[in-house]
């Protein structure tokens, strides 16, 4: 009996319906024919050869990692690609997924890399390699989307790394649904994952994303793989951020930063210096904050613009910062500091196209807003750190020592931190650390 699967959320319905009752998407159901069972399940009375194994009897294996030669990519993975692991890489169209994976394949000169291209011809892939300035004898191309043929090639060739571009173009001939449908993506991921585990071959899958940024296909494919990476960045900016959403062999807090050039992705070794290279000095509405991305502190410029509204309802716009948190900070500034923002349009921007989610930059956003409202600049040699509570208090943050060291390394003269963090910060030569308890005290210290 056929079933109908929602392409947006994977919801299964016994009959077609116009609107999905789970995700409320219209016209998202696709018919899936049942896969014929090739092997019948054993009935009672027939002994099974499958038996559980005691944990102490399982042979241990070493965590064998293969560095790719791209430090930022290895950092996000946890030190390199683990043998037999399956990595799913997602990102917006044109963000640079195929370019980055091509660079990984070209860097591994001592390994046999199989690059399966389902979207481009061999000539197109060769053009990209020539644009990157590298041609490797150990990188093999396979323009195929039939999973049965791909499985035979992997079984017979036994490569050291397999890259699939992309998983949405792969299909199984015994399924009647079209490539890219929920059933095809799920079965393709399952088949390639089993093959990678059985042959102990690392596998990288490139995946499309939907309009809301999630990886296209059923959510279950993220559970099948070992690592899920997200390639982020604004198409109008040259910077790209690679972050781990799931990682069974490493931390999910690390990020890798790249810059897009004509000859491929370039690693950004010192992102703080890059993000601050174009900041303006002596202008109001600008503050320097420090955000922790994994174990790495990054100094970023927060920009704010406050102007009298021309509408009945003032605008609140945030780029790279959570809009709800901005609204909360505006309420605190009105209630606890006395700033009149009810008739003002407020625009907040995180320079460089990066997105910040941690609350340790709250005081920097508040200082930039107050600076723009009063048209008084914040000291350009000061870095501000701290989370703002609803009572106007400045709350303790983590990794304050690393943030202060990063500010001192880049030549800043002063750092504003929560008062409770002073005991965790070692005084560095050439930089003064000031502790504050309330948002009123912080703004007075920064702009008077």
Image (cartoon, helix red, strand yellow):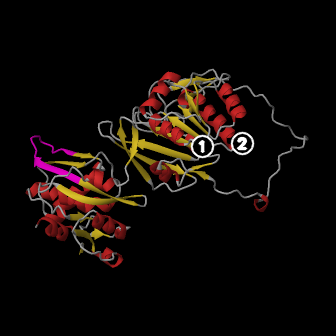
Q: Position of residue 34 (x, y in %)?
A: 67, 25
| Residue 155: mark in rendering | none
Q: Residues within 10 Å of mark 1 (few under 14, many from 20)?
A: few
| Residue at (63% x, 32% y) in the render | 187
In this rendering, would 173 be left or right of 217? Answer: right
Give the quadrant of the C terminus. bottom left
Q: Is residue 92 above or below residue 371?
A: above
- What residue do we see at 56% from left, 40% from top? 204
Q: Which residues are magenta?
A: 302-316
Q: Nearer the viewer, residue 109 or 61?
A: 109
Q: Quadrant of residue 237?
A: top left
The single residue placed furthest to the bottom in the displayed view is 423
Instruction: From the top left corner, tell me how far across and down residue 152 is, in percent.
Output: 70, 29
Viewer-side label of 2, 1: 1
User: Is 182 on the left or on the right of 99, as rendered?
Assistant: right
Query: Residue 67, percent across and down?
Result: 55, 50
């Amino acid at each position: 009996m056929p079933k109908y699967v929602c392409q947006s959320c994977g919801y299964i319905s016994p009959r077609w319906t116009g609107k999905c009752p789970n995700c409320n998407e219209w016209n998202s159901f696709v018919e899936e024919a049942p896969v014929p069972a090739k092997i019948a399940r054993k009935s009672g009375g027939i002994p099974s050869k499958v038996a559980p194994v005691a944990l102490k009897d399982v042979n241990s294996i070493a965590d064998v990692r293969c560095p790719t030669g791209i430090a930022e990519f290895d950092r996000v993975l946890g030190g390199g690609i683990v043998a037999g692991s399956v990595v799913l890489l997602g990102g917006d169209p044109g963000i640079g997924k195929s370019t980055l994976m091509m660079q990984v394949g070209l860097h591994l000169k001592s390994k046999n890399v199989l690059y399966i291209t389902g979207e481009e011809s061999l000539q197109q892939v060769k053009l990209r390699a020539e644009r990157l300035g590298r041609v490797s004898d150990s990188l093999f191309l396979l323009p195929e989307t039939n999973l049965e043929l791909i499985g035979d090639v992997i079984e017979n060739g036994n490569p050291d790394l397999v890259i699939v571009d992309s998983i949405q173009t792969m299909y199984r001939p015994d399924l009647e649904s079209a490539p890219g449908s929920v059933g095809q993506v799920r079965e393709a991921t399952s088949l390639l994952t089993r093959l990678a585990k059985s042959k102990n071959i690392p596998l990288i899958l490139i995946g499309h994303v939907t309009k809301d940024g999630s990886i296209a296909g059923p959510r279950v494919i993220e559970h099948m793989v070992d690592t899920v990476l997200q390639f982020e960045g604004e198409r109008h900016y040259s910077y790209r951020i690679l972050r781990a959403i799931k990682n069974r062999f490493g931390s999910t807090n690390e990020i890798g930063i790249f810059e897009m050039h004509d000859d491929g992705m370039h690693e950004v070794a010192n992102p703080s210096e890059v993000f601050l290279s174009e900041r303006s000095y002596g202008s109001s509405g600008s503050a320097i904050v420090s955000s922790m991305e994994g174990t790495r502190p990054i100094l970023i410029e927060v920009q704010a613009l406050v102007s009298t509204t021309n509408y009945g309802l003032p605008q609140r716009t945030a780029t790279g910062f959570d809009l709800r948190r901005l609204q909360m900070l505006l309420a605190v500034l009105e209630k606890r500091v006395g700033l009149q923002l009810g008739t003002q349009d407020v625009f907040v921007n995180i320079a460089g196209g990066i997105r910040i989610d941690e609350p340790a930059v709250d005081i920097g956003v508040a200082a930039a807003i107050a600076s723009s409202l009063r048209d008084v600049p914040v000291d350009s040699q000061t870095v501000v750190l701290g989370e703002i509570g609803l009572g106007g208090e400045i709350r303790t943050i983590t990794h304050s020592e690393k943030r202060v060291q990063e500010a001192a390394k880049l030549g800043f003269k002063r750092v504003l931190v929560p008062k409770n963090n002073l005991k965790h910060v070692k005084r560095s030569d050439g930089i003064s650390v000031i502790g504050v308890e309330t948002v009123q005290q912080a703004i007075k210290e920064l702009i008077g």
